[in-house]
Image (spheres, rainbow, N blue to C red):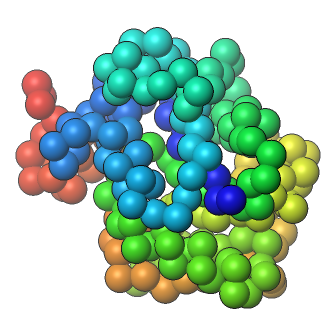
Amino acid sequence: MIGAIVLAAGRSERMGRPKPLLPCRGTTFLGAVLDTLGRTRAGAIRVVLGRGAEAIRKAAGLPDDLVVVNPTPERGMLSSLHLGIAALPPGVRAFLVWPVDHPLVEAETVDRLIAALEASGAPLAVPVHAGRRGHPALLSMGIAPEIETAPETEGARAVVRAHASDLVEVAVDDAGVVTGIDTPEAYAAAFGHPPVGE
């Protein structure tokens, strides 16, 4: 089974409003990520929320069993990742790590990551577009203990760096993997207009 951890616990300070609920493709950032996951081989989805978790859960119509609440999101993304991994059910052999501010990733990209990890036996797979690594990454459950001991200042990046020689890069024609939308300016660049209300 392939799992997915959607990281959506940040304070969205640079955006000025909760990123999970920003409009995107007729839904929201979070809705777009979940819709995309629904068209892939991934299951066992967990959404990690922080401050305002209940309001976001209700607005997004998330069932309780998908939601993991990080009580201390100010500790950073790594703390959310720890909680997401702990909430995955038994039988998950690899999991996507998907920041909610990358809502434009295509379903085909996710399935290509899964296929590449399975074919290579590598501990992790990362998408690459135009020479740039992006999100989401797909990590084997076998390296989850390394995430548990990664330094908070670096988080999962330290694990990716430690596996520089044995990870698999998956070249994709999907600019969504490198389109992080965390400011009003980035939103306007991606959608051609500022967030509603700006």
User: Based on the displayed image, in which of its 4 quarters is residue 180 positioned?
Assistant: bottom left
Q: Residue at x 37, y 33 (%)?
A: 20
Q: Residue at x 12, y 31 (%)?
A: 196
Of residues 33 and 163, the one nearer the viewer is 33
Quadrant of the image containing the C terminus: top left
Where in the figure is residue 135, as x and y percent of width and height? 51, 62
Above or below — where is 165 with respect to 23?
below
Q: Residue at x 65, y 22 (%)?
A: 70
Of residues 129 and 83, the one nearer the viewer is 83
Where in the figure is residue 110, as x and y percent of width and height? 49, 68
Q: Residue at x 65, y 74 (%)?
A: 125
- How many numbered marks have been drawn onto this rendered protein structure? 0
Where in the figure is residue 64, as x and y percent of width and height? 54, 21
User: Based on the displayed image, in which of its 4 quarters is residue 194 positioned?
Assistant: top left
With 104 as the anchor, is 161 left or right in this view? right
Above or below — where is 93 with respect to 81?
below
Of residues 50 and 106, the one nearer the viewer is 106
